[in-house]
Amino acid sequence: MKKILDGEIYKRIYGALMGVALGDAMGMPSEFWSRSRITRYFGKITTFLPAPKENEITRGLKAGEITDDTHMTIIVSKSIIESGGRVDPQAIIKNIVKWISDDQNKNFNIIGPSTKSAFEKIRNGASMEEAGKYGVTNGGAMKMIPIGIISNWRDMDNLVENVRLVCLPTHNTNLAIAGASAIAAAVSYCAGGGDDLEEMIQVAISGVQHGMRFGFEIIGASIIKRIELAIELVKTGKHIEEIMNDIYEVIGCGLDTTESVPAALAMVLLAGGVPEKCARLCANLGGDTDTIGAMACGICGAFKGIDAISEDSINLIQTTNQIDFTEIAEQLCLIRMQTMI
């Protein structure tokens, strides 16, 4: 077991999980604020901060506290582990329901609109396939880091099937599955030792191509073309603030998968794959800062590994939220190694 914990793959998996919490907690105070409002209120976010009382979504949360992005990542991870390495939508739903019931007032309020809508439909007797029929938000993509961890990007059909199963109850649409597949594919590439961000983008695009074949058809912008445009914006050579303005204004940083997934991939590239730099950039980007940060920093954590995240950040996140990713990372590492045999 010690050999596993000292191994590069384990460090990347642990880094991916902690990266989600890092980007989530850093982006939490500015969630759904515009770039200009973030600048007016904070100046620039450079560290973990408590949510301002003016933020109607996150007010009351402490510095370093996570939101549903990390909670859902943990739920999916534990569901996979409990199911013996399989992706079981029923197990995931069961664990989400339990999490909500643990603190109904707080937890139900912070989950996204597609998930809320799907749960209402399931309660009213809708099938799992029908419940997620209109889910197009990034609530599917934000919880895909564990799927990237356990799946092999070289077997894209299996990876996307795992994505589809997670999306089934809440985000059963082609756009949501395609965007979620991009995040899972990027993480899988990085967790497996990938060290080329340009290649990572192409792997993510391949995930989109495969994912678009599944789910109910929803009309929307091309995720692939938006990813390509977002990457072009990063490579313009402009000042970093100008690039972030362009991503915010041209690509968009809202709830829709078609905006936030391309934005997250662009932020990974803009930060050079460095988790803490990426977290700061995402927190100041505007829009759905915590979810974009969670996805982008999850990829960065897989790319650079846990050693790229400071002990101070790790300790604050773990102490504030009473979570320890080491056992989850260990179990997911074992599952990944088994799938690679």
Image (spheres, helix red, strand yellow):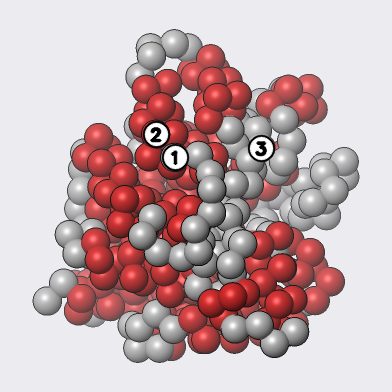
Helix, strand or loop at mark 2 = helix
Q: Quadrant of residue 234?
A: top left
The span from disc 3 to disc 2 (Cα, nearest Å) is: 20 Å
Image location of residue 334, percent across then percent down: 26, 77
The C terminus sits in image quarter: bottom left
Give whichever of 253, 211 is nearer the camera: 211
Q: Residue at 82% across / 44% down in the picture? A: 55
Measured as percent of width and height from the top left, residue 309 is found at 42, 47
Q: Quadrant of residue 318?
A: bottom right
Circle 1 Cα neighbour tier, 10 Å, few/some/many (<14 / 14–19 / ≥20): few
Q: Which residue is mark 3?
A: 287
- Which residue in the protein does label 2 denote? 225
Query: Residue at coordinates 70% horizontally, 43% vertically from top-left?
Result: 31
Residues at marks 3 and 1, CA–CA distance in whole angstroms: 20 Å
- The answer to whether residue 315 shows anywhere in this view is no
Badge 2 amino acid: Lys
**Is residue 298 left or right of 101 when viewed as pictured?**
left
Q: Tell me what residue is drawn at x 30 percent, y 40 percent.
A: 201
Callout 3: 10 Å neighbours few (<14), some, many (20+)?
many
Closer to viewer: mark 3 or mark 2: 2
Left or right placement of residue 138 versus residue 55 in this view: left
User: For the residue labelled by badge 3, is the local secondary structure a helix, a strand or a loop?
Assistant: loop
Task: Quickly name the residue at label 1.
Answer: 222
Picture coordinates of residue 28, whole percent (x, y)? 68, 47
Q: Tell which of 12 and 32 is nearer to you.
A: 32
